[in-house]
Image (tube, helix red, strand yellow):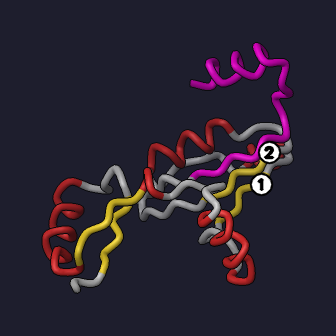
Amino acid sequence: MQKEYKGILKGRGLPNYGWKIFEVSGAKAGQEIGLALLGFVGRLVIVGFNMAKIEYSVSRLMAFDAEIIGTWGCLPEHYPAVLGMVLRSRILVEPFVELRPMSAVARTFQEIHDAGSPEKRVVLTPDF
């Protein structure tokens, strides 16, 4: 994977340093990939959440002059601007969300418990 990544950078004439990586999947594998791609003066931003433990040599941060930070997304004062971008379709949300009625909450929790993280994020809506 790292070889492919470096090949893409080289093929497009892009620098191999200073990249900002946003890991939003919340999957252990996604976070491991983000760590593997973190390079010189890079920044890895962890948005996705999970409870898995991941092994990483933190001395690489010093050697690369890199950073890892965590965030829930953005500060509340930025919500109006972000919501505006969603409403103007500059940020697409629909392909990543599945709506279900609130009455399906027990079934939904059981499905997620049995199968793991769903492909799309489930949003429960009121039953009217």
Give the residue number, with chain letter if any, for mark 1: 67
- Mark 2 Cα-neighbour bin, 10 Å: few <14, some 14–19, many ≥20: many
Q: Quadrant of the C terminus?
A: bottom left
In which image quadrant can residue 123 be found?
bottom left
Q: Is residue 124 magenta?
A: no
Q: Marks 1 and 2: CB-CB under 8 Å?
A: yes
Q: Is residue 58 left or right of residue 114?
A: right
The numbered mark at residue 98 is: none
Please check the rendered image and state whether residue 21 is part of the magenta-colored stretch, yes or no.
yes
Assign a secondary structure to mark 2.
loop
> Which stretch did the figure color magenta?
1-23
In percent of width and height, residue 106 lies at: 15, 76
Can you identify the residue that label 2 sits on?
Answer: 42
Q: Helix, strand, or loop for circle 1?
A: strand
- Which quadrant of the figure has residue 11? top right
Percent of width and height locating residue 121: 38, 61
* In this rendering, position of residue 11 left or right of residue 57: right
For image coordinates 62% across by 19% down, the residue present is 4
Q: Can you say whether 11 is above or below 16 in the image? A: above
